[in-house]
Amino acid sequence: MRNLKIVREILMTKGSICEWEAIYKYAITPKELSRIIDLVQEEGFIMSKQRFFFDFEYDVVKINKKLK
């Protein structure tokens, strides 16, 4: 899944992704982003979801040490 790899890389390097960034930069819908975040959490990322004015931002709280 191409979008899963993109989101995982962004979270590993930048530490967060918001819905607007996913929509406009990477052409990922909010519903698809939500599913991808669920998959990423199953891999060992611990995420927090914060509401801003008009969208959500997903921040990495902790990454499992086994991920590379």
Image (spheres, grey):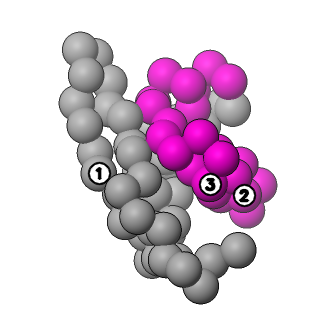
Magenta-drawn stretch, dominant element (helix, strand or loop): helix
Q: Nearer the viewer, mark 2 or mark 3?
A: 3
Seen at 25% across and 37% down, the residue is 50
- In this rendering, position of residue 23 left or right of residue 58: right
Cβ atoms under marks 2 and 3 closer than 8 Å: no
Residue of label 3: 12
**Span colored in magenta:** 1-25
Query: Helix, strand or loop at disc 1?
Result: strand
How many C-alpha atoms fall within 10 Å of the one at disc 3: few (<14), some, or many (≥20)? some
Where residue 24 appears, x then y in whole percent? Answer: 62, 20
Give the image quarter of residue 62.
bottom left
* Total numbered labels: 3
Of all residues shown, which one is farthest toward the front? 65
- The reply to whether the C-beta atoms of the residues labelled 1 and 2 are less than 8 Å apart is no
* Disc 1 residue type (three-letter): Ser
- Which callout, 3 or 1, points at the residue further toward the start of the chain? 3
Between 29 and 51, the residue placed more toward the observer is: 51
Residue 15 placement, left or right of 31:
right
Return the disc, 1 or 2, that comes first in the chain's sequence: 2
Residue 65 appears in the picture as rendered: yes
Quadrant placement of the N terminus: bottom right
Which label's residue is closer to the chain start, 2 or 3? 2
Q: Is residue 4 magenta?
A: yes
What separation in Å lies between label 2 and label 3 (alpha carbons)? 10 Å
Residue at the spot of label 1: 48
Cα separation between marks 3 and 1: 14 Å
| Residue 18 location, quadrant | top left
Q: Which residue is mark 2?
A: 5
Q: Is residue 35 visible?
A: no
Quadrant assignment, res 22: top right
16 relative to 19, above or below = below
Residue depicted at 45% across the width and 30% down the height: 19
